[in-house]
Each structure stands twice: as structure tokens, then as C-alpha cells.
Image (cartoon, rainbow, N blue to C red):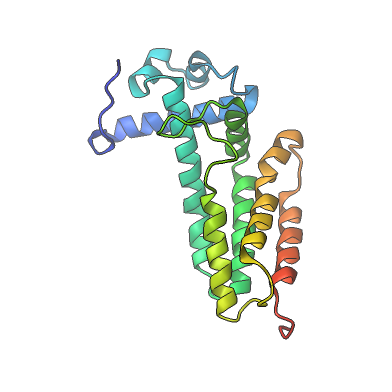
Amino acid sequence: MVIEPEPEQRTFTEIARRQQIVGAAIDTIAEVGYAQASLARIAERIGISKGVISYHFTGKDDLIKQVVVDVVEAGRNYILPRVSAEITGPSTLRAYIVSNLAFMRDHRNYMVAVVEILRSGAFKTDGGRRLDGREVDVATRLLQEQLARFQAGGEFRDDFDPSALAVAIRAAIDVVPHRLVLDPDFDIDRYAGEIANVFDRATRREDTP
């Protein structure tokens, strides 16, 4: 059994190597699919031995867990500053939609890899449960709360259901990774503009010019 040091105990070199391995795993899964992305194939991609991966990760499941964690963290770091920079409800909603989709555009392999991982049923929560549609959708809940806050503040029209609209917005965003798997040339920028306009009209007050 490989005993991994706690994150705070890892050296800069160890952290860099782990990041390199995670990046190779993402690119390999995106290229050949989850089932074909063996540790040996991932190691070959960056010119290291399989044993080097085994030093840093206890196995493929451990590596895949880190892939998902890193993708989620990268998305958060990309999106939050762009959304937080906005002040009004309409501009915040547009930034939310556009930045989510821009992250997917700029990190296509991340998206394809996550789709492959989720399709395989390989990724498990810390409790050992496989991720599926019954998992709590934190992103939708947080979006719902934000929509309700701007609605209560009078920046959005007051006759829509924040819960229903949050589900619709997340659905419009979350379908894109699957589309990227089917259509690598999918025009995300055009799609983002259209979707942002749709939900701007869906939330806009009638007295807004």
C-alpha cells in the first residue's frame, strides 16, 4: 500500500508531478475514453513509468478522484471572479452563463474526460456511492438562491419561479460537455450568446429598457 503524505507535507516537486499526471490522465481519457486510459498509457504519455504514478496515487480510482476534484476547482477559479465582478442582477446572470460556457470552451478535454468518467460510473463519493442524477445539485441550489435574491431586490421580474429557472439554466449549460463529445466543432461562443439572451429576456422586468 502506498502511503501518501498529507497535501501540506508534499514538496513542490511532488505537487508538480501530481499535477502533471492528472493533466496526462485528462488528455488520455479525452482521447481514448475511460476504459482504454490505463495507468501505463497515462504514464507513457508523459514519459514516466507506471510506478511513478503508483507512488503518487494508490490506483486508478484515486487518480480519477483527483481528476474530478481538479476539474471542479479549475472551473470554480475561472468562473467565480468573473461572476463576482458584476453588480447588477442581469449582468451577474449573463456573466454566470457566459463564464461557465467559456470555461468549457477553453478546457474542452476537461469536459470530455469528465463525461467519460461519469459514463463509466467510475467516480465515487467519499462515502463510496457512485455519482448519479440523484446526487444533490449544489450548483443549481446556489443559482436558485442568487436568482431569488436579485428577484427580491427588484432587479428581476417577480413572477418567475427561481427554482424552475435555475434548473433550466443549469440544464442549458450542462448539456454542452456531452455536445462536445459528439461535435468537437460545436460553436460554444454563439451558443453562449443565444442562451444568455434567452434567460435575460426570461428574467427582465417589463419596465427595463
Measured along the vertical axis of the image, is residue 112 above or below residue 150?
above
In this orientation, which residue lies closer to the viewer: 56 or 119?
119
Q: Is residue 49 visible?
A: no
Can the viewer see residue 30 in this picture? yes
Task: Where is residue 42? Give x, y as percent.
Answer: 51, 20
Apparent side of residue 191 relative to residue 142 in the rendered image (left or right): right
Marks counted in the figure total: 0
Q: Residue at x 68, y 70 (%)?
A: 160
* Residue 165 placement (x, y as % from top left): 67, 62
Examine the rendered structure and indicate whether residue 192 appears above or below residue 87: above
Q: Describe residue 172's horizontal placement relative to residue 68 as left or right.
A: right
Note whether 94 is above or below 169 in the view shown: below
Residue 17: percent from left, percent from top: 38, 29
Q: Quadrant of the C terminus?
A: bottom right
64 or 127, which lies in front? Answer: 127
**Where does the image place residue 161, in percent across and percent down from the top left?**
65, 67
> Which residue is at the far left?
9
Q: Residue at x 31, y 31 (%)?
A: 13
Q: Quadrant of residue 147?
A: bottom right
Quadrant the N terminus occupies:
top left
Nearer to the camera, 49 or 92:
92
For this view, does 75 lie left or right of residue 90? left
- Above or below residue 160? Residue 104 is above
Residue that sits furthest to the bottom in the current view? 207
Q: Is residue 79 left or right of residue 94?
A: left
Q: Name which quarter of the figure residue 182 lies in.
A: top right
